[in-house]
Image: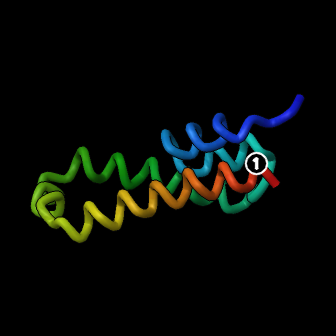
Amino acid sequence: MSTKPWVAAVLNGVLPGAGYLYLKRRKVFSLLLIPAVLLTWYWSFTDPQVKNYYGSSVLILATVLLEVAFIVDAYTEAKS
């Protein structure tokens, strides 16, 4: 089975680290990243104080740039 770069990119876009598991690369990084992302999502939806952080344009920009970096990196890893 050949890996498809776009699948790795989409998986990393939905859940950072999942694209690396699909590629069977960076397993330790993925196994640390996925729980971190899930715990952050849980925290952001259950802690009422988090609403104060979402107004920060710096936080939003950093999150978007990090997500794009994971998508591009998974795509690049699959191509190589």
Report the residue at 67% width, 62% height from top.
29
Residue depicted at x 45% and y 55%: 67
- The kind of residue tagged 1 is Ala
Picture quarter with the C terminus: bottom right
Q: Which element is circle 1 on?
A: helix
Residue 61 in percent (x, y) is at 29, 64
Query: x and y percent of residue 72 in the render?
Result: 58, 55
Q: Is residue 29 left or right of residue 70?
A: right
Query: From the image, which quarter does the N terminus lie in?
Result: top right
- Measured as percent of width and height from the top left, residue 18 is found at 62, 43
Q: Residue furthest right?
A: 1
**Eyeballing the image, is 9 above or below 72?**
above
In the drawing, does residue 76 fall left or right of residue 40?
right
| Residue that lies at the very extreme toward the bottom in this rendered image | 58
User: Residue drawn 35% across and 48% down?
Assistant: 41
Nearer-the-camera pick, 32 or 13: 13
Q: How is the image coloured?
A: rainbow
Residue on which the image places disc 1 = 78
Instruction: Please determine whether, in this image, residue 54 is positioned above or below residue 21.
Output: below
Tally of numbered tags: 1
In this rendering, would 61 be left or right of 78?
left
Q: Position of residue 45 (x, y in %)?
A: 24, 45
Task: Judge the density around disc 1: few (<14), some (14-19), many (≥20) Cα neighbours within 10 Å.
Answer: many
Instruction: Tell me what residue is drawn at x 35 percent, y 60 percent.
Output: 63
Residue 6, picture quadrant: top right
